[in-house]
Image: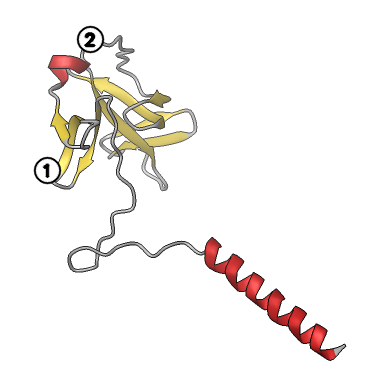
Amino acid sequence: MKPIRSVCAVLLALGVMAGTAAAMPRTPTVEGDGLVTKVQVDCHADVRRHYLPEYDRRVWHRHRQSNCRVVIVEPEDEYDDRPRDCHRDVRRHYLPEYGRSVYHKHVGERCRIRVYNPHQGGGSNRPGCVKLGPLLLCEN
């Protein structure tokens, strides 16, 4: 009876180790000095504006689908033809550029977005802040 138990224990241990090894995530590849690891490449074909480290700022761009290279797009070329809700008061709704609902208003001729975040603290008469109901929202 003891040999059957030991064989079962060994088989059970091998099965657990094999299942654990298959479920373990792979370690990411480290490039350069090892301080930064690229986790995901966001190759989007539609025009978006977000931070690109190679330009060290937020830019309007899209990516080529063949090789994921960045193509800079000027908003007046391609992006300004979409219909806009160009409200001048602070409102919260979904903005595709941010991928979520944000408090914001539109400013200027070109209807640029100015984002406001909830402020934690006093001082309702701070510059750059707007009171919306019980919330105090301040510019970034």
**Of label 1 and label 2, which has the lower sequence position?**
1
Closer to the camera, 128 or 33?
Answer: 33
User: Which residue is labeled 1 in the image?
Assistant: 55
Residue 93 x %, y %: 43, 24
Q: Quadrant of residue 66?
A: top left
Up-down relation of residue 112 to residue 129 (above or below): above
Closer to the camera, 43 or 72?
Answer: 43
Residue 43 x %, y %: 28, 36
Closer to the camera, 62 or 95?
Answer: 62
Residue at 26% across, 25% down: 113
Up-down relation of residue 98 to residue 30 (above or below): above
The amino acid beneath tag 2 is Asp
Indicate the secondary structure of the residue bearing disc 2: loop
What colour scheme does the image use?
secondary structure
Whether residue 78 appears in this view of the structure is yes
Up-down relation of residue 97 to residue 7 (above or below): above
User: Which residue is labeled 2 in the image?
Assistant: 81
Whether residue 110 appears in this view of the structure is no
Residue at 65% across, 71% down: 16
Residue at 30% across, 12% down: 84
Circle 2 Cα neighbour tier, 10 Å, few/some/many (<14 / 14–19 / ≥20): few
Residue 92 x %, y %: 42, 25
